[in-house]
Image (spheres, coloured by chain):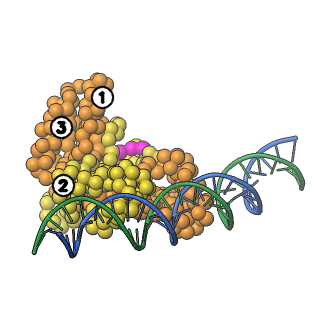
Chain colours: A orange, B yellow, C blue, D green
Amino acid sequence: MPLDRIDIAILDALQKDGRLPNAALAEKVGLSQSACSRRLDNLEKSGVIAGYHARLSNTALGHQMTVIVHISLSGQFEKTLSDFEVAVKRCPNILSCHLMSGEYDYILRIAARDLPDYERIHKEWLSAMPHVTKINSSFALREIVDRTVMGIRPDLA
Amino acid sequence: MPLDRIDIAILDALQKDGRLPNAALAEKVGLSQSACSRRLDNLEKSGVIAGYHARLSNTALGHQMTVIVHISLSGQFEKTLSDFEVAVKRCPNILSCHLMSGEYDYILRIAARDLPDYERIHKEWLSAMPHVTKINSSFALREIVDRTVMGIRPDLA
DNA sequence: TGCGGAGGAGCATAAAATGCGCGTAGGTTG
DNA sequence: CAACCTACGCGCATTTTATGCTCCTCCGCA
């Protein structure tokens, strides 16, 4: 889907404030409300906007810890992978999981409240997942960057 | 701030859909609209809800590729780290970056359009960052999970 | 037992979103 | 080059949603 400069402005604004009322959005990007609403509709339907979410304060909720986990399985058969992936999807603490090229099969990012909480997650979830042969946990000492999306460039087709 | 089960339900719902109308939210959590609105107000004012954001689809924007990069620096002096981190913050393709315990100093998640694009990023950004001694790139073959949010447990104070 | 605060309901009003008719610019075709 | 088509804008009327009361109820406490 081709995005023009107004689309970019809309996306930009909604990344910063997902609840920006359509009226305000329209004014900000220089459109009438109806035109703006129609564009927004298209952006949502076409999947450019994948969703809207409240961002919660992790300190308020006590999830202070990020753990990066590298995992190897006993094989690369599709069945082996999908068994594992089903289990991954069930664990609420897993923020992201990718099947990877390279030394490990999967890399996971996990949120935990503290070390004992991670211990629990490790025991109850990670170790219990099927076909897992190796688990390597690295703890984040500091977060330098965390964005959901990179800057949008106008030349995207 | 103490959260009861209704607050949790509200947070849960808004994490999943940040634009859920108050009326629907109220029904979902079993409150009247006004009561629900008042609670929401408190959650926002107290900072438990830190913001609302549109989540954009990286693939829809043409960034199909996720690369996990492990990086080691020449030392762990604070100056060394902060030089590097300043550079990291400048690169728009870096979605996340954490200082880590373990074998590598930093783990980065990078969005690229395709392999040539990643090559460019590697050359122009990663290799150019100060004090870098080792760069290890792993390519994501498939994304199994990617959320910003995790389930909230009622026992959080 | 009576007071006071927290928190819920219901309703009226204010604000926002949505759908529809209409107008215009730019590209295409006979 | 004129007729036509489409994409996309505007404004307005209608519907949907949020907000700001007022009142009610439950509970802890003196």
Secondary structure at numbered mark 3: helix
Mark 1 and mark 3: span between their CA atoms?
Answer: 16 Å
Q: Residue at x 12, y 43 (%)?
A: A120
Say which mark, if any, is on residue A82. Answer: 1
Secondary structure at numbered mark 1: helix
Q: Is residue A8 in view?
A: yes
Q: Residue at x 50, y 50 (%)?
A: A44
Label 2 vs label 3, nearer the camera = 2
Q: Is residue D1 shown left or right of residue C14?
A: right
Q: Please state the horizontal and vertical placement of residue B64, each as a whole percent of the image.
A: 42, 44
Look at the picture and state if B111 lies above or below A153: above
Label 2 vs label 1, nearer the camera = 2
Say which mark, if any, is on residue A110. Answer: none
Residue type, numbered disc 1: Ser
Q: Residue at x 12, y 38 (%)?
A: A123
Mark 2 and mark 3: span between their CA atoms?
Answer: 20 Å
| Callout 2: chain | B
Say which mark, if any, is on residue A125. Answer: 3
Circles 2 and 3 in contact, beta carbons < 8 Å: no
Q: Is residue A140 in view?
A: no
Look at the picture and state if A80 lies above or below A53: above
Tell me if mark 3 has few (under 14), some (14-19) or many (20+) residues whose alpha carbon lies within 10 angstroms of its own: some
Q: Splitting the image into 4 quarters, where does residue A72 fall? A: top left
Residue stretch in magenta = B64-68
Name the residue that disc number 2 marks: B156
- Check if residue B141 falls in the magenta segment: no
